[in-house]
Amino acid sequence: MALKTIDTKDFTTRIHHLWNDQWLLLTAGDFASGHFNTMTVAWGSLGVMWNRPFAQVVVRPTRYTYEFMNQYDSFTLTAFPAAHKKALGLLGSQSGRDGDKIAESGLTPVAASQVAAPLFAEAELCIECKKMYHADMAEGTFLDKTLHSHYPDKDYHRIYFGEILAVRAAEHFMAEARA
């Protein structure tokens, strides 16, 4: 799929659909050394923070990707056409600790342009981010107590904010394509 570089001001998407229905792969590590891991994410946000375009993701400390998110200073988010939903399901349900789930998924890691973490050749949206903040969720900070149902094991997420350095995407992600 031919992707175009998009200025962050021209990037547009149906946010809820992207996170909740389409899903994304969160990848952290170093492509050049072959030391990276990926996982499917369905919770996060895109926007502006500290006058910079940013992506916010959350990772539980029990996930293998958590180690990579803490060790490296960047991450990528990639979205895929519906034909790859099965691969995303596999990458979200199996651990990279237990084998080469990326090879099993059939997706192809490729070098990013601005960060060490890889992208995937089959993606229709590639977002490259440099970490700029993290914080740990804590039990006592939830204002809506019903949210505790997402944490029966009290394995609260770490929140990461990444400054978006580069976006490459299929044409339907460009603002002018929707005008």
Image (cartoon, helix red, strand yellow):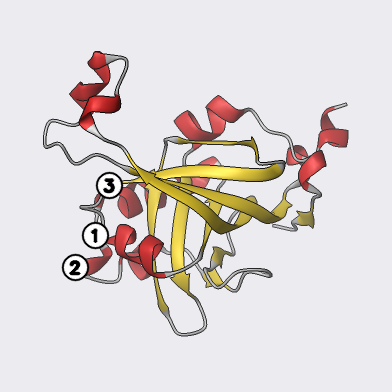
Front residue of 85/156: it is 156
As shown in the figure, which amino acid type bears the numbered disc 1? Answer: Ser
Badge 2 density bin: few <14, some 14–19, many ≥20, Cα 10 Å: few
Q: Is residue 68 left or right of residue 128?
A: left
* Rendered image: mark on residue 98: 2
Reading the image, the residue beneath label 3 is 60
* Distance (Cα) linking label 1 and label 2: 6 Å
The answer to whether residue 97 is seen in the rendering is yes
* Rendered image: mark on residue 95: 1
Front residue of 69/105: it is 69
User: In percent of the image, x 62 and y 44: which residue is there?
Assistant: 54
- Picture layout, residue 32 above or below residue 165: below
* Residue 59: x %, y % from top left: 34, 47
Q: Is residue 140 left or right of residue 131?
A: left
Closer to the chain start, of discs 3 and 2, is: 3
* Residue 67: x %, y % from top left: 30, 64
Badge 1 density bin: few <14, some 14–19, many ≥20, Cα 10 Å: some
User: In percent of the image, x 52 and y 83: which residue is there?
Assistant: 32
- The quarter of the picture where residue 58 lies is top left
As shown in the figure, which amino acid type bears the numbered disc 2? Answer: Asp
- Picture layout, residue 154 above or below residue 40: above
Question: Which residue sits furthest left?
Answer: 153
